[in-house]
Image (cartoon, coloured by chain):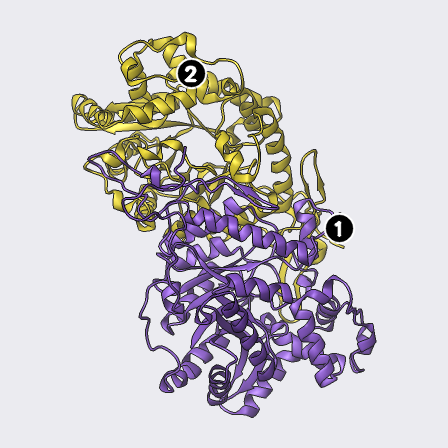
Chain colours: A purple, B yellow
């Protein structure tokens, strides 16, 4: 079983920052995040994961919704850790391939092979204005660019063969330029000449992670991803997704074991189930309806007032057409509405935990049982652990759930590898330009 | 006197990596650079400085001319240091304002106020192809974008007032959105809506550093820069530049003391002058004419062969017209040719030291004398120290020159401040959106 710690300022419950166990003064303190990563490394977690997006959420008035920049933050974390993987979210819509390729190559070098890339196309339409665009590209356009972008950066990461860096003091040959290649990527949307200006990194490329579960997202993941982060409320939904994504990968000629499925899980843990439920309720009581109603509008397109909180969710007002309906999170929330027919307040509390990811409240054994069931019954290769609050919510998981998973033989006691690829059981890719030893390289630099 | 350590893979002499004192295996080892920064911090240096450019130099065949990515590398350095400033070079031509503003805001947060930005427009025309452009924008176009870019990012850094982050657990107000502002930058070339998604950083903005000495570069520096890195071969040239840039700043209504002039200096240090000259010669003997002739072509537009090394530099072949002639480095090299009438080989050895920056060889006292003279005679507020090789070339400076500068009362014995602004004696800028206490903010977020 693979486990990542998904780090979020304050924690994943929207009201975590208001809880007495939180210290809001540390939300911008890198030492707080370094401590979290050290704790996750002490628990032998596969990686830490940072979300990101290039815009500010309106509801920052009510919750810790600023955005730590992942490359700087993870580099500072790399400096105080040795083994744990470092997964940065980065957008293919709002970055340049050459710049992004450099950031990841550098992160992989300085961490000695621990970088992962959560490939996103950016869902928030307000990002467009921050980049001089009148409107956010629609879903299909963003995925077309993502495809083109991924090809371009993969070529850049391959542009130095492993043997290109020679550094022979006697002969004076620093780099064998016959083994450094222009990439001359000429895609439908992007042109990139190359080569990269950084030698090939320990993992060759960062581990490719993907988080969308829409149709476009699944097709992209099946083709390219080595790990998928996904949100499911029920075992059945998790199993369906797992079977579908593995089958798609196999159909494309890939080994399905090299595409890990990692659902999000946000656990409230206490010594009794009742105490865990009370803890969850304690957090829910700190939520602010203004915040949640904004979230609901963003997710479903429905604007409601505080007077409507105790009525049913008005199914007929949900905008199923148009751009919003393409997003995977939209369908997940719609499923909750249709399956559970909650009041507005009940739905808001469901979403408050982890923005649609699965929240469970129970004893350490109950949480471990849930993870084991999903793992053994074909819904997960591991989990993206999203503690409701930090650091305490993670400490409870590490101290009480991880030992049970180990006793059951489900999770490693210590690291056997050094790179994120090794933790995940993934091979190191060869450079596409690597020629058989002794043969001439195909496309030498001019 | 202010002192920065200009870090360059291997060192600034082009053949440094070939010298017996170098360890080419550590060129991509972040620990090597962390050690350098710790040494510079132990010497109470103002900052470490990283150059950058988004393309690969052709002559990487002969020298360590790959490019460490500054944000990742400096973040890893920030994690193991407490006081020293962290100056990253970044291009206004080949980045997006929103992304760059986030990287600097994060670096400033995680280092607790130590970030500096060396603002460049990118001189290397081969960068264009890495960003899908058919040709590199000409000098004037690049400076027009730099102006627009700087305005946009400055507004982004101001977009959160200092008091905007409230994080009051009781009331539930996380951020006072009346104190977070859209910037709605609508310049001739760039549009950026804002606000930034990161609270205002300890220094408000990174320290603005600039390194071009062309006419456009000087005009830009006089208006915006808080420190200027510059290359001069003679005291007279340094004095002329110093007087000119300070006068320009004063004419724009700025306090000239808030624009520091920091020439580059590359010192070969030994116990006698003769030994220092021999050391310099030892490095020059390791240079490779293929490398130097490529450099000469890039700087002057003159293609020469190895047969011509011992003849005069053919003044008549130098392309004084056109784009190349606008660059500040071009004029510096042309001055050497006209003043000293060197052979090609002599010129190449001059440039091998630090690509046109001043190289001196002498005893610690002689080096200190030179720095003191430039500092006291109106050519410098301090220096960008460019050790010929690393770490040894810096260690000699720190152990033998710095104590002399301290005895003479020219350089601090320990830090009195915590931020780069404090080291440089610069004020912390207020946010342009900051309203008088109690008054309504001007442009609240929608």
Identify the element where label 1 is drawn.
loop
Mark number, residue B439:
1
Residues at marks 1 and 2 on the same chain = yes
Up/down of A192 relative to B377, above or below: below
Image point (61%, 21%), residue name: B251
Whether residue B339 appears in this view of the structure is: yes
Secondary structure of residue under mark 2 = helix
> Which residue is more in the foreground, B441 or A117?
A117
Chain of the residue that carries numbered disc 2 in the rendered image:
B
Q: Quadrant of residue B266?
A: top left
Residue A286 in view of the camera: no
Q: Position of residue B437 (x, y in %)?
A: 70, 51
Mark sitting earlier along the chain (1/2): 2
Circle nearer the viewer, 1 or 2: 2
Q: Is residue B80 left or right of residue B116?
A: left
What is the x, y in percent for residue A92? 58, 53
Q: Which residue is mark 2?
A: B237
The disc at residue B111 is none
Q: Residues within 10 Å of mark 1 (few under 14, many from 20)?
A: few
Give coordinates of residue B192: x percent, y percent: 68, 44
Residue B371's place in the image compared with B434, above or below, is above
User: Would residue B440 appear left or right of B320 to someone viewing this image?
Assistant: right
Which chain is indicated by disc 1? B
How many other residues sit within 10 Å of disc 2, few (<14), some (14-19) or many (≥20)?
A: few
Which residue: 50% across, 40% down?
A184
Q: Name the residue: 43% across, 49% down.
A: A157
Relative to B317, is A207 above or below? below
Which quadrant, please, contains the C terminus of chain B?
bottom right
Q: Nearer the viewer, residue A11 or B407?
A: A11
Q: Position of residue A345 (x, y in %)?
A: 73, 80
Residues at discs 1 and 2 in contact (Cβ within 8 Å): no
- Determine the CA span between mark 1 and mark 2: 51 Å
């Amino acid at each position: 079983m693979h486990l990542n710690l998904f780090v979020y300022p304050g924690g994943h419950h929207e009201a975590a920052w208001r809880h007495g166990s939180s210290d809001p003064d540390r939300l911008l303190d890198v030492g707080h995040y370094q401590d979290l990563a050290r704790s996750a490394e002490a628990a032998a977690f596969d990686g830490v994961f940072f979300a990101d997006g290039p815009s500010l959420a309106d509801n920052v008035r009510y919750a810790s919704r600023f955005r730590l920049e992942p490359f700087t933050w993870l580099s500072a974390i790399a400096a105080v850790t040795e083994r744990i993987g470092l997964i940065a979210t980065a957008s293919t819509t709002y970055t340049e391939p050459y710049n992004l390729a450099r950031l990841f190559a550098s992160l992989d070098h300085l961490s000695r092979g621990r970088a992962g890339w959560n490939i996103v196309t950016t869902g928030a339409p307000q990002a467009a204005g921050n980049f001089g665009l009148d409107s956010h590209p629609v879903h299909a356009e963003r995925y077309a660019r993502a495809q083109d972008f991924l090809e371009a950066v993969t070529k850049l990461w391959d542009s130095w063969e492993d043997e290109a860096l020679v550094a022979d003091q006697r002969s004076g040959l620093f780099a064998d330029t016959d083994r450094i290649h222009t990439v001359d990527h000429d895609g439908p949307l992007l042109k990139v000449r190359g080569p990269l200006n950084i030698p090939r990194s320990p993992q060759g490329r960062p581990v490719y992670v993907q988080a969308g579960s829409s149709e476009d997202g699944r097709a992209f993941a099946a083709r390219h991803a080595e790990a998928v982060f996904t949100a499911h409320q029920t075992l059945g939904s998790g199993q369906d997704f797992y079977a579908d994504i593995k089958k798609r990968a196999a159909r494309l000629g890939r080994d399905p074991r090299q595409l890990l499925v990692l659902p999000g899980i946000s656990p409230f843990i206490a010594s009794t189930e009742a105490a865990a439920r009370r803890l969850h309720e304690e957090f829910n009581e700190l939520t602010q309806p203004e915040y949640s109603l904004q979230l609901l509008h963003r997710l479903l397109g429905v604007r409601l007032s505080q007077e409507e909180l105790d009525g049913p969710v008005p199914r007929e007002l949900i905008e199923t057409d148009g751009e919003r309906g393409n997003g995977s999170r939209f369908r997940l929330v719609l499923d909750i509405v249709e399956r559970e027919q909650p009041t507005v307040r009940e739905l808001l509390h469901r979403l408050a935990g982890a923005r649609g990811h699965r929240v469970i409240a129970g004893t350490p054994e109950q949480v471990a049982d849930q993870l084991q069931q999903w793992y053994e019954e074909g819904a997960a290769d591991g989990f993206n652990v999203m503690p409701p609050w930090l650091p305490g919510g993670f400490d409870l998981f590490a101290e009480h759930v991880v030992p049970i998973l180990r006793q059951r033989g489900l999770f490693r006691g210590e690291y056997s590898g050094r790179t994120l690829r090794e933790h995940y059981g993934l091979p190191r890719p060869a450079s596409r330009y690597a020629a058989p030893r002794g043969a001439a390289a195909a496309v030498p630099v001019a």
